[in-house]
Amino acid sequence: MVMPLEMAMWTGKMVWMALSGWVTSCLIVADEIAVSLRTGDIGAFHVG
């Protein structure tokens, strides 16, 4: 079954938007954690 070009482009655009939003969210959270660690608002993470 052949997918029309417009549908393939739309699907690619939706996947790209979802992935770029996820990556942006992860970078924002990582930046906030780094700022908090630098300013001393939170300490080192102790696991275990």
Image: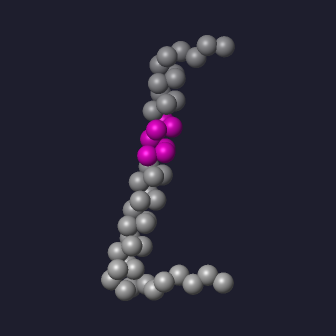
Q: Residue 43 vs residue 2: left or right?
A: left
The residue positioned 49% from the left and 45% from the top of the image is 19
Q: Where is residue 31 in the image (x, y as percent from the top left)?
A: 38, 67
Residues shaded magenta: 14-20
The residue positioned 49% from the left and 44% from the top of the image is 18
> 19 above or below 6?
below
Q: Where is residue 2 in the image (x, y as percent from the top left)?
A: 61, 13
> 33 above or below 15?
below
Q: Number of marks in the image?
A: 0
Locate the N terminus and report the quarter of the image it occupies: top right
Depth check: 17 or 43 in front?
43
Whether 15 is among the magenta residues is: yes
Q: Position of residue 24 (x, y in %)?
A: 41, 54
Main SS, magenta residues: helix
Depth check: 21 or 39 in front?
39
Q: Residue 1 vs residue 3: left or right?
A: right
> 29 above or below 6?
below
Whether 45 is among the magenta residues is: no
The residue positioned 46% from the left and 59% from the top of the image is 26
> 25 above or below 30?
above
Q: Position of residue 12 (x, y in %)?
A: 49, 31
Q: In which quarter of the image is residue 13?
A: top left
